Structures are given as C-alpha cells and as structure tokens.
Amino acid sequence: MRDHFELRDGDAAGRIGELSIPRAGVTVETPALMPVINPNIRTITPARLESEFGAEILITNAYIIHRNEELHAAARDVGLHDLLEFDGAIVTDSGSFQLSEYGDIEVTTEEILEFQREIGSDVGTPVDIPTPPDVSREQAERELAQTATALADAETVDTGEMLVNAPVQGSTYPDLREAAGHQADETDLDVFPIGAVVPLMNSYRYAEMIDVVAAAKRGLGRDAPVHLFGAGHPMMFALAVAAGCDLFDSAAYAIYARDDRYLTVRGTEHLEDLDYFPCSCPVCSARDPAGLRDCDGEKRERLLAAHNLHVSFAEIRRVKQAIRSGNLLELVESRARAHPAMLDGYRTLLDHVEQLEREDPVSKGSFFHLSTESARRPEVRRHHERLARLDAGDRVLLTEGSKPSVDAYDAVWRIVPPFGPFPRALSGTYPLTAETPERTDRAAYEAAAEGIAALAAANPDSSFVLTHDGWSKSALARVPDGVAVEARGGCRGNGDDSADADDAHESAE
Ligand SMILES: [Zn+2]
C-alpha cells in the first residue's frame, strides 16, 4: 500500500484521490492538471497559475534548467520554487523528451535525479526512453529494458523526500505496456507516468491510447497514481480519467495559443473561424472573437492561453463532480459524441469492461441509458454476472409489463433493457432504477436478452416465459431456445427490424 496516495470516490476506473507530496508540504487532489512551464518562456506566470487558476501543481523541465548556465546557477542558488515563484508542488522532467527528439543527452539518471533534488524539485524523473508508437517490437523491447535500468538506477539514488516518477513505456504493444506497468509497480518509486502517448493523441488515435492505458493499468496496482504524460487537451480528460488516469499535464494551453488555436471540450477551433465564443471565462466574457483577433500578437497569445487554461481546469472540475455524482460515464458518452475518434476511444474503453467493472462502485446516483454504448457499461455486465448466480424458481414469467392477475407463475420478474430480468424486489436498487428512453435501441434489447440467457443457463430446471414489447429479431435470437416467447403486442420504435419481431417470435417457439 502506497501511503502517499489515498483513493476517495470512484466511478468506472476513474477516481478522486489525494496525492501527498511531502517535500512541497501539499496534498494535491486528483484528477489534477499540471500546467507545463517552460523556464525560458512564461506565457502565464506560475504565480498567476496559482492565484487565478487554482493550480496546485505544475511541471517544468529540469534538463532545460540544467543545460542553461544562467538558469542552472539561479536554480542552485535560490531553488526551483523561488526561481519560478510558485508555492505548490513542482514536478520536473529529466530530458527524456530531448533524448527521444535528438537521440542523445548529456546526463545520466543519477546526475539528473541528484540535480532535481538539489534544486528543490518535489517529484523528479529518471532518464527513461520514450519509445514512440508503431516501432518494431525489437526496438520497443530493447528500449524498455533501458527504461527498466533507469528505474533500477533511480532506486539507488538518495532522493530524500522528493517523490520519483517511474515511467511506463512499451510503445503500442499492450503486453509490453502491461509488463512495464508491473515492473514499475515493483519498484519503490512513487508516481507512474504513461509515456510517449502524445503521437497517438496528436493523430486522434484515442482507441489505441485507451488500449495503452488499460494495459499499463493492468500491470500497475490500483493504488498507483497514474500520470498520462503529455495529455493536455480537455476533450479527452473525461475518457482518460474513466480509464484510470489521475494526472495530466498541459503544454497545449500555451502551444495552441501561439498558433491562434482555441481549445474547447469538443475539440480545437482556429480563432479565425470563430464568430462566437462558446465559453464564459473572463477572456471570452470581455470580448468577442473579432475583438480578440484585433489584439496584438503577444497579448492575443496570452489571452488565448488564459482561455485554454480556464476551459481545461473547468473540465477537470466537471470530471471530479461527475465522479462524485456517479455519472462519469454519462459525461464520457457526451464527450465521445464530439468526434468520431473519441467515440472509438469510448468504445475501446468498453472493450475493457471487465477491468472497469472491478473498480466501478456497486451503487451510484443514476444510470442514464444514452446510446448503444450504454448497453456495454460495467453495470450491465455486473448485473448479468449476478443473474448467473440467482435462483429463479420453477416457473417464471419475465415481463416488461405489469404483474398478471392469474397465479400461473412461481415468480414474475421485471425486464428492463439493457439489464434484462430481475426479481421485482430489486426494482429500487442501482442500476435497475435506470432512466431509459421510451424508444430504446436494439443494443439495449440484445443486452437484455443476454441477461435472460445468463439466468436461463444458471437455472436449467426452471421454465421461463418471456413477454416482450416488439423486441427486434436480433434480440430475440439471443433468447435461449428453452424460453417461451410471447409478444405483448404493440411495437416500439426500436430499430428497423422491429416489424419482423412476430416472425422471430414464431420461429423461437
Ligand atoms: Zn474562454
């Protein structure tokens, strides 16, 4: 058990946690956003990040400071906190990025960790190898071995109270990411950045990003604080948190501002294309896009950077509130509708439903069935697993309708898509209190039918009768042969083959 990271509330694999950073004397509530500070260029000063945006933690590059004579001397002299004028926690990177860009750097893990400790960093980083996506397996394995050596070297350095990052690499090979996660978890290091995912995010490969995160999480323990290194776009915070990431860093706010790009939770806009601001932060309240375009270059960059930060911090708060309220996956569903690649990311997250289900709380506020993806949520899977353990009785009616007046059954169970059947006594329990649309989609009926199949398999000696309201052929095809099926009459708008339901009903009998 790591004593510097405490988990509070959870939703899917997302969580609100408390990361204690002893050297800074602060506790950072996660999910947290760490603005990236380039020690040479301060678009927005660290003091302002703290006072105006509420930043509790930021990240800067120790290697840049190490290499710059002036900064090096100043950092040694007054320390990193005074140099940056920031009282919160400061994380430092090691130059790994420079290593991956230029192929060579001038420091070893021992040297850079000692330097980070000396200048007063609160969380230091060894020199790992950020292996990009799509490299050969041989390269990924070789570089992962070098990263493992860096982590082992880091363990031997006297880092005092400074926490130390244990980066998880492995390119786009899930098994290597999982092994790397496991290896990092075995060290006595403290924070776990998932590295080299920026190329995936930049090319909207959110599905593969989620596979990488899920694999790393399988290797890491549940109590490991996870940093999605280089992830700074607010459109993917909810998705990444739902996959189990706790820390994000944003260089995006400044880099995008330099290019006149305006961040939103639905994607990136170019300032020149905007007629209206979909935001009420101080920057956007005080002017319209034309007014911002009229500002001179430096001022415009500063104002855009401020907006980009406001929208990013607001999204982190929204994600935290969603975890508290138990509707993080509803937020992910709505974010997934902003871009097809985000939808791929969400669908991929649901491919890992077994992993999500292990962490997802048993009871939450409300389950909103909002899309065909809702039928694949962990709550549905958990209900089906529960059905496989329930004793049903001899003769059971499963119905979407009310309890019949005749006493022909030992039990009458309700059916609610996408969950399927359950004893009426459970009607008031989560997630069976779900809000579902009147015009439920086919995926929900198919999932309900799979629930019936799970129940029937667990009760081979029971006889079941299903009465349904115009289920689709595809749903009825999932109902096991031994279950008698009766249509209650009346069709709902549940897909283009609902008119064929009666045919399916006859063939099922
Ligand atoms: Zn704004």
Image: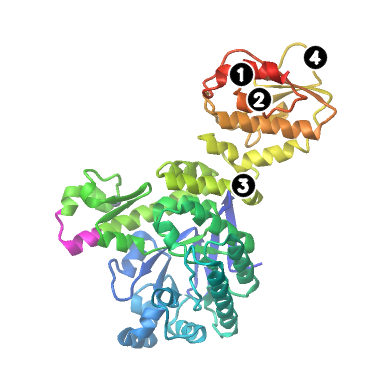
**Which circle's residue, 2 or 4, is located before the other in the chain?**
4
Q: Give the quadrant of the N terminus.
A: bottom right
Q: Which residue is mark 2?
A: 476
**Which circle's residue, 3 or 2, is located before the other in the chain?**
3
Disc 2 on helix, strand or loop?
Answer: helix
Name the side, left or right, on which 2 lies relative to 407: left
Q: Residues within 10 Å of mark 4 (few under 14, many from 20)?
A: few
Q: CA distance from mark 2 to mark 4?
A: 23 Å
Q: Which residue is mark 4?
A: 408
Name the side, left or right, on which 338 lies relative to 409: left
Pointers 2 and 1 in contact (C-beta within 8 Å):
yes
Disc 1 on helix, strand or loop?
Answer: helix
Q: In front of the other: label 3 or label 1? A: 1
Residue at image point 63% right, 41% down = 379
Pointers 3 and 2 in contact (C-beta within 8 Å):
no
Instruction: Kindly tell me whether residue 166 is visible in this rendering.
Output: no
